[in-house]
Image (spheres, rainbow, N blue to C red):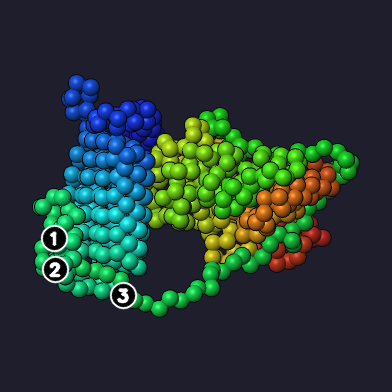
Amino acid sequence: MADVSEVVARSMNINEKLGPRLQAAAEQNAILRIGWTNAGDPVPKNGELGLCPALPEGARLRALGVLGSWVAAFGSGGSFTVQGDAGSFLGAANQGTSVVCERMAGHYTGYGMSAGTITVLDGCGDDAGACMTGGTLIVRGATGARVGGGMENGLIVVHGDVGADPGAGMSGGRIIINGRCPTPPPGVILRPLEADEAEEVNGTLEDESLHVPADAVCLVPQDRLVVEHAGFVVSSGDLSQVGLLNEELPPLRTYQTVDTVALLGTSEHVQSLALPVPILPHVVSGATLSPDKKASGQVSSILNRHPALVETEPRAVDVLLVGRENLLDTPRYIGDAGAIAIDLDQFPPMNAEELDGLLVALRSMAKAKVPVMLVEAVSRIQALHAKAAYHGVDVAMARVEDGSGLSEASVLPMMGRSKKEHLDGTTTQAGLLLGFAASGHDLAVLMAAGVDFVGCVAPMADGEDIAYWLQGTQDDLAHELRRVGVNSVDMLDRKHLRALDRETAAVSGLRLAGYGRPLPHWFAR
């Protein structure tokens, strides 16, 4: 069996070669083939994943073999046919492509699709049509559990039996089933298909063998009360009770230059992003940080050179955060970004092969050699660091505000142990995503604890105000470095940290100020 890295390399190579040919083939109305030699001899593919993302209007492709996950995702037009099996997330985030799988498909077929048609001719796995907001998914054969789970709109037609919890959490759309259907979960109504509905649906299906009969059933959402949720539990503390000192060196001169720069991406295989201060502000749109024409030269300079974590309209220095909420916009924005971050908390749980498929699809759409980051809840930091190291991504960023209520101080030993176990000897960096705007003191504490850089919400919505905040934070960090007697953030170490109260010492394992040692329970076996 081929090595994982070989499969990924083959998949990237196929996408790279297809790119320049797609437009020419579309203009000539030609079909591009994957899995055949130039002479037409079949050479079936075996496990290639993330193939042919973001197919444009007019593109026509046909693939032979057993394909992996995230094939024909993010498409906006054209057609893609698989003569064989396909893995999970086939046609995910589809926005207009016609996708046909002539055999079986895996889990999450048509995940998050908004338009287009996906047809699977020999059954598919769990969660088919999950979170779809439009388009049509047609399955001949049995489907697994939770078909149409969380769907908001669109049409699913199943000619076969469906698994447990059909339509779970659906808020719109229809699921038509020509086969056995278990009792639906609460919030979903099972009713007979009406005659005019059958006529309407069949009018949209070109293949008469896939028309629905009059005795089919239909699942639709039930009207329910709309309850405003208060949100999740936030962090139970901050870093104000962690002090910084240096018992060995005197302070630097107040005017001495210190180095506050951090790099995002240290591998020789990527184009690193330079952070003037080790902070990645999280704003919704990169346009927020595009300086106004009336802005001063200093403000423009700060904004133009400082990367941010954004969800829309990234600049060339920004990191595009890809999640469920902006999945459909990803093809439009990803080519402009300087790095990619995948918000794993917004996606369904993915195994290693499925995550590889998403990585291949995103990298194929992005600029060459961009750093890649994984973002996940800090309560799963061990799994996050292990995944990041296994997949060779550049940054593993743990989100502190994950609903667990863990304090920042308690996260420090969790991150340190996990980083030592999983990331030592790799080029993968460790980051923390905070739920509050970090100060220079916070940055110094976290750098000393082993964090490579910090993501946090920006405290202001205006670009000029953010520039002043960034400059002030850099000045505060420089002051902390001079006070501690080091001339670079890279020289900060855990030995510089002290817990200022017993509670912080108890959860962080830091030496208690005055006591000079960690509390005794940290030495217990």
Identity of the residue drawn at 40% across and 78% down: 225
Residue 68: name its quadrant.
top left
Residue toward you, 442 or 157? 157
Q: On the rendered image, what quadrant is the C terminus found in?
A: bottom right
Image coordinates of residue 76 in percent, x first then y, are 35, 44
Mark 1 or 3, nearer chain start: 1
Dot 1 corresponds to which residue? 212
Nearer to me, 348 or 437: 437
Q: CA distance from mark 3 to mark 2?
A: 21 Å
Foreground tag (3 vs 2): 2
Q: Residue furthest bottom?
A: 225
The image's mark for residue 350 is: none
Residue type at the position of mark 1:
Val
Q: In this image, 453 relative to 421: left or right?
A: right
Residue visible at 64% across and 47% down in the picture: 289
Return the disc, 2 or 1, that comes first in the chain's sequence: 2
Disc number at residue 222? 3
Instruction: Kindly report the distance in space between the C-alpha atoms of the residues bearing marks 2 and 1.
Output: 10 Å
- Measured in 3D between alpha carbons, the distance from the residue under mark 1 to the one under mark 3, in whole angstroms, is 23 Å
**SS under mark 2:** helix
Mark 1 neighbour class, 10 Å CA radius: few under 14, some 14 to 19, many 20 or more: many
Instruction: Confirm or deny contact between disc 1 and disc 3 (CB under 8 A).
Output: no
Is the C-beta separation of discs 3 and 2 under 8 Å? no
Q: Which mark is residue 195?
A: 2
Q: Which quadrant, please, contains the N terminus?
A: top left
Determine whether label 2 and label 1 are within 8 Å by CB: no
Q: Crowding near pointer 3: few (<14 within 10 Å), some, many (20+)?
A: some
Q: x%, y% of residue 451? A: 64, 47
The image shows residue 4, relative to residue 131, as above or below, that is: above
